[in-house]
């Protein structure tokens, strides 16, 4: 039994239950299991490679991107999918901040406002947001913005 994905609000508002379904972020509390029969579902347990943590998980540890830990699996799962979305060029509202001087290889640089916008659906009751942003930026290989 996999126990990493958490049930937080049961209304799709907190992001604690975030998983990836066929490479796209999804809230598992709002997803009917029968509707994704045959889909590839990635939970927090599948992000690491065996006993070796994914760089994103390592960054969360090194940047202290968690406090109580309840939201951490959803934060990491969401960030994992978000980095893939950004890498393939998906846009966010923060992409259109009026300054396009930060475009690298067709994508805007992953700035702190960009990370915050893309992670807005994940709530941390402890308020570790600054550390979560640091961890995501670190895993993405971006400089502080």
Image: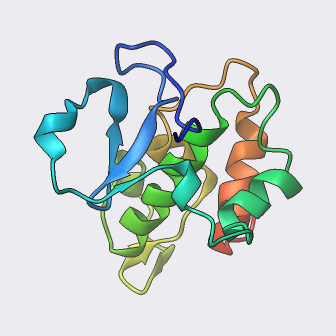
Whether residue 65 sits left or right of residue 39 in the image: it is right
Residue 105 in the figure: left or right of residue 124? left
Furthest toward the left, the residue is 35
Count of marks, rendered view: 0
Vertical relation: 103 (above or below) 73? below
Looking at the image, residue 35 lies above or below residue 51 = above
At 77% across and 43% down in the image, what residue appears?
A: 65
**Image position, residue 134 (x, y; %):** 75, 53
Q: Nearer the viewer, residue 51 or 130?
A: 51
At horizontal 14% and vertical 36% (from top left) the residue drawn is 34
Q: In which quarter of the view is residue 124 placed?
A: top right
Q: In this rendering, is residue 89 above or below 97?
A: below
- Name the residue at 51% across, 73% down: 102
Percent position of residue 71, x then y? 63, 30
Please state the horizontal and vertical placement of residue 51, each as a whole percent of the image. 74, 68
109 vs 47, nearest the viewer: 47
Residue at screen point 32% across, 41% down: 26
**Would residue 145 be visible to someone looking at this image?**
no
Please indicate, yes or no, whether residue 22 appears anywhere in the rendered image. yes
Q: Residue furthest bottom?
A: 105
Q: Locate the C terminus by quadrant.
A: bottom right
């Amino acid at each position: 039994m996999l126990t990493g994905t958490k049930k937080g609000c049961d209304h799709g508002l907190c992001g604690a239950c975030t998983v990836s379904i066929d490479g796209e972020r999804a809230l598992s509390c709002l997803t009917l299991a029968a509707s994704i029969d045959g889909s590839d579902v990635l939970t927090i347990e599948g992000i690491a490679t065996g006993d070796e943590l994914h760089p994103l998980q390592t960054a969360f540890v090194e940047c202290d991107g968690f406090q109580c830990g309840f939201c951490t699996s959803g934060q990491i799962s969401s960030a994992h999918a978000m980095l893939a979305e950004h890498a393939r060029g998906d846009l966010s509202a923060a992409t259109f901040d009026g300054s396009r001087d930060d475009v690298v290889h067709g994508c805007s640089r992953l700035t702190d406002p960009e990370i915050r916008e893309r992670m807005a659906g994940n709530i941390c009751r402890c308020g570790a947001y600054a550390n979560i942003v640091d961890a995501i930026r670190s895993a993405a290989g971006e400089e502080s913005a």
